[in-house]
Amino acid sequence: MRELIKYESRKYFKSNKIIMPLLFWILFLRVCYSEGNLSYVPSIVMSMGVLFFVMTWISFSYQEVEELISEQLLVLKLQSAELYNVSKFIFLLLIGLGFSILGIAFPMIQNLLNHFSIFNREIIIPDIINGVVLHFIIASVGVALGALFHPRIIKDKMSVLMVVTAAILGYAKGPIILEFPISKFVLWIFPPVYDILGSFNGQEYFDLQHMILPILYGCVYSIIIAVIQLICLKKVKF
Amino acid sequence: MSAIISLSNISKKFGRNEVLSNINLTIQKGQSIAFVGNNGSGKSTLLKIVCGLTNPTSGEVKCAKRLKFNYVPEHFPKMSITVKQYLTHMGLIEGMPENKVQEGIQELLKSFFMEQMTDSQMKHLSKGSLQKVAVIQALLSKPDVLLLDEPLSGQDVKSQRKFISMVKELNEQGVAILMSCHEMFLVNQLSSEAYEIKNMQLEPLDVTKYTDYDYDILSFEKPEMEANIPAVITEMIHKLDDNEGEIRMVVPREDSNQILMQMLQKGFKLRAMKGIDE
């Protein structure tokens, strides 16, 4: 598994597909934390929302890096299609972790360089840890969503449009449900991004009580989608 | 010999297009089977069904145990990593010890005249060199079953000879060889049993009628005016490589003179002629 992830990372980074999402993420962080006197929790929540889209983008584009023949050879070498598919998921989660750490490290460094004037209160260690954890949870939701639209599962050329629509509906389902309450019977199926981000409305600190539900939402959704993806890939094969 | 794979009533459809229908076949340990047939007849699909990469539409594939399949695909993808990096990763992913992987790679790269290309990016390799990488990754470890899908396409004659001898050696060690190919020359060299896929069915071919051949390799320069190889000659050719400006063919020695004369009459210029073993 370790060797497979090393191979995946070498191929992925050589493909240059990470450059655009990484630049976008850095640019967002630069703009977001260019002003001072920000509230910590709302800033982190906004950054989580953007990371969800970035990770969906990365996950979706990553599925196209490996050519079909190359995938077939790897499956035969591993003697397990499941192991191969799980390794790809783990690799994406590792990228998600990297982006999450960057999403917290960047404002912390900015804060330090600006004599602790970026945020309107002192940042404590739990703020940092909780920020990374929540970023990682939302990143895993994005990874799951992008991975579900694997070219072997959804062969439609409109899959880019489909993944973008699913991501937007996941992000904006709260206001849609408020406007059209009946839509909640359909919109629950989309990623729980609004539910996760909305849990921190009006919060000054990330306390454990308010974090449990969003973490559960993110983990359960990601695991369900990952299992569905693995089942679909096992069924369609090559 | 013991049966390791059995195919029962295998059918495969792509949409409404059926390519295989009610295929039954038992594959024994150490057997070497060739599947020949026209393009799109389902040869590659059958190989992929055998190793579980593709699901049959109906029917069943039974394996005696968990088998290790090594596979030489027909079209190997161009990648942005070097030959050595790719082969090293493949060996380690298979679970081979690092030193064995490095030894194996060095030996195989030397055997296939690729030592100079060790650090070349795979995306810059020619079709023939890429095909050699496909062969090397499959020969790094010993499998239970070796799947060969048009394995010789684009390779030079010396590498082809090396490949054939290595595959024969594996076969003698009990590795089952399943091969899809167009070339009767390769069937003659490697297979003890052959089937033609015709009308979605497997039709046994009499391989004994190909086994007594000695072969010559003829290389021709194409005439400036476009000329086709006469149909009567095409039927005699057991392997044909058509490169830009040059045609190389493997033909039964008894037909060499006739082929040579007809090709010269058609305006092709002879560039080289030698026995396959020279």
Image (cartoon, rainbow, N blue to C red):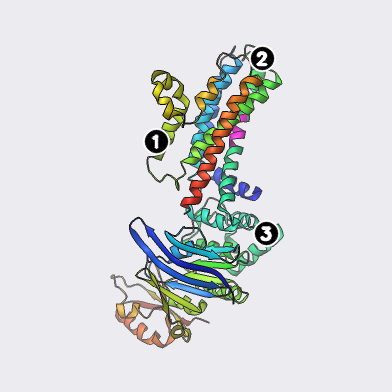
The image shows residue A159 at horizontal and vertical percentages of 40, 40
Q: Which amino acid does label 2 sit on?
A: Phe
Taking A5 as reference, is A229 left or right? left
Label 1: how many Cα within 10 Å (few below 14, some 14–19, many 20+): few
Pointer 2 residue = A116
Q: Which residue is drawn at 59% across and 30% down?
A: A137
Which subunit holds the residue at mark 2?
Answer: A
Q: Which element type, helix, strand or loop, lies under badge 1?
A: helix
> Percent from the top left, x then y, of residue A103?
60, 27
Residue B272 lies left or right of residue B71; in this view the side is: left
Which three-letter amino acid code belongs to the residue tagged 1? Leu
Measured from the top left, where is residue B160 in percent x and y?
A: 52, 72
Which residue was labeled with disc 1?
A161
Number of the label disc, if any, that sits on residue B219:
none
Q: Which mark is residue B96?
A: 3
Residue drawn at x 53%, y 82% is B277
Q: Give the range drawn in magenta.
A: A95-100
* Subunit under mark 3: B
Q: Quadrant of residue A215?
A: top right
Q: Which circle, 2 or 3, is nearer the viewer?
A: 3
SS class, disc 3: loop
